[in-house]
Image (tube, rainbow, N blue to C red):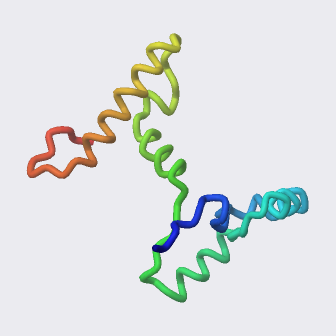
Amino acid sequence: MLKKPSPADADKHLCADAAYTGASALRIKVEHGYIAHVKGRAQEAAELQRDPAKKARRWVVEVAHSWFNRFRKLLVRYEKLERSFLALNHLAAAIIAFRKVPMTVNIIYG
């Protein structure tokens, strides 16, 4: 019977942008045993030109911020109270999740 490798035995990969190319970032990556995948925008754009079928990778956080930034009231933060701002964030998250559900008719436009 094959044993499943433990997470400690697995290779640790770190995908980052060009901001993490400095000496201190390199030292930390080596200390923690990461296999670094660090690319600048120009390098990534050149790779996409060579292979147009390949799509650019985006961090999950960047995608989520992009979705939330479409709600102008959250982007500018008009709310004075924290609980109002939090409630609007929850509402935006619910609308984003609802838009991801496949439906025959879209009842929430925007």
How many numbered callouts? 0
| Residue extending furthest toward the bottom | 50
Is any part of residue 13 visible from this angle?
no
Q: Is residue 110 above or below residue 77?
A: below
Q: Nearer the viewer, residue 18 or 24?
A: 24
Give coordinates of residue 69: x percent, y percent. Answer: 47, 40
Q: Residue at x 52, y 60 (%)?
A: 58
| Residue extending furthest toward the left | 104
Q: Residue at x 25, y 40 (%)?
A: 98
Q: Nearer the viewer, residue 70 or 1?
A: 1
Q: In the figure, is residue 35 to the left or right of 65?
A: right
Q: Residue at x 49, y 86 (%)?
A: 51
Give coordinates of residue 4: x percent, y percent. Answer: 52, 66
Task: Name which quarter of the figure residue 25 lies in.
Answer: bottom right
Q: Is residue 70 above or below residue 57?
A: above
Q: In the figure, is residue 107 to the left or right of 13?
A: left
Give coordinates of residue 71: x percent, y percent. Answer: 40, 35
Give coordinates of residue 75: x percent, y percent. Answer: 50, 33
| Residue extending furthest toward the top | 81
Q: Residue at x 57, y 66 (%)?
A: 5
Q: Nearer the viewer, residue 50 or 8?
A: 8
Is any part of residue 8 visible from this angle?
yes
Query: Which quarter of the figure is the C terminus placed in?
Result: top left
Q: In the figure, is residue 107 to the left or right of 97?
A: left
